[in-house]
């Protein structure tokens, strides 16, 4: 069901844990599926210098947060914001369709963490595109 890359990131997730005094924190969850994801970002000069996560959830949610934190490291806030759930899924060599919502969670967690940072610095939060909001709550329960 999962690609080798997904299994690798699920079994050996990168960047697990918390950042002390993070610049941005984003916590997201999907009540239907039970995944809870917390993203921590360290930001210096508009660059994501460190990213970590804590995720309780299915294999796809853990692999997505692992890959997403890898992908945003070293990126500017603008580029990190543009990281889409599809890019995360592609980097994982694909996710089964019923697991795509787990990669959406990673994108949302990073967005929340970036906006947490922006608000703390007196900046306007960026607007979440509503393109995939309809995908939420329609997935079958994910237990894996
Ligand atoms: Zn899930």
Image (tube, rainbow, N blue to C red):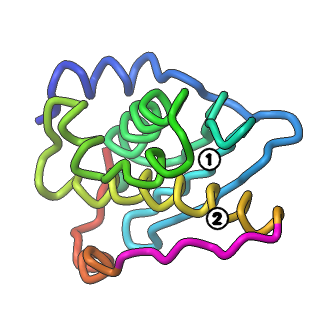
**Residue 126 part of the magenta segment:** yes
Q: Secondary structure at mark 1?
A: strand
- Kindly identify which numbered label has been placed on residue 129: none
Badge 2 is on which residue?
115
Task: Pick the residue in front: 134 or 117.
Answer: 117
At label 2, counting other C-alpha atoms closer than 10 Å, the crowd grade (few under 14, some 14-19, many 20 or more) is: many
Badge 1 is on which residue?
39
Give the quarter of the figure containing the C terminus: top left
Percent position of residue 142, x then y? 30, 57
Depth check, mark 1 against mark 2: the one in front is 2
Q: Earlier in the sequence, mark 1 or mark 2?
A: 1
Q: Secondary structure at mark 2?
A: helix
Percent position of residue 116, x then y? 71, 63
Q: Residue at x 73, y 52 (%)?
A: 24
Q: Quadrant of ligand 1?
A: bottom left
Percent position of residue 41, x then y? 68, 41
Residues tagged 1 and 2 counted as in contact (Cβ below 8 A)? no
Question: Could you say which quadrant of the image residue 27 lies in?
Answer: bottom right
- Locate residue 51 relative to residue 134 in the image: left or right: right
Question: Which residue range is magenta in the image?
Answer: 122-129
């Amino acid at each position: 069901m999962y690609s080798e890359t997904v299994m690798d990131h699920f079994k050996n997730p990168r960047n697990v844990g918390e950042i002390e005094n993070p610049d941005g924190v984003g916590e997201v969850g999907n009540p239907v599926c039970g995944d809870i994801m917390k993203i921590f970002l360290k930001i210096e000069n508009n660059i994501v210098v460190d990213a970590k996560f804590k995720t309780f959830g299915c294999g796809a949610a853990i692999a997505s947060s692992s890959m997403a934190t890898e992908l945003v490291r070293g990126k500017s806030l603008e580029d990190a914001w543009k990281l889409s759930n599809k890019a995360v899924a592609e980097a994982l060599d694909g996710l089964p369709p019923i697991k795509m919502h787990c990669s959406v969670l990673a994108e949302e967690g990073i967005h929340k963490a970036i906006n947490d940072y922006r608000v703390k610095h007196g900046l306007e939060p960026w607007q979440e595109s509503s393109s995939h909001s309809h995908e939420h709550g329609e997935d079958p329960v994910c237990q894996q």
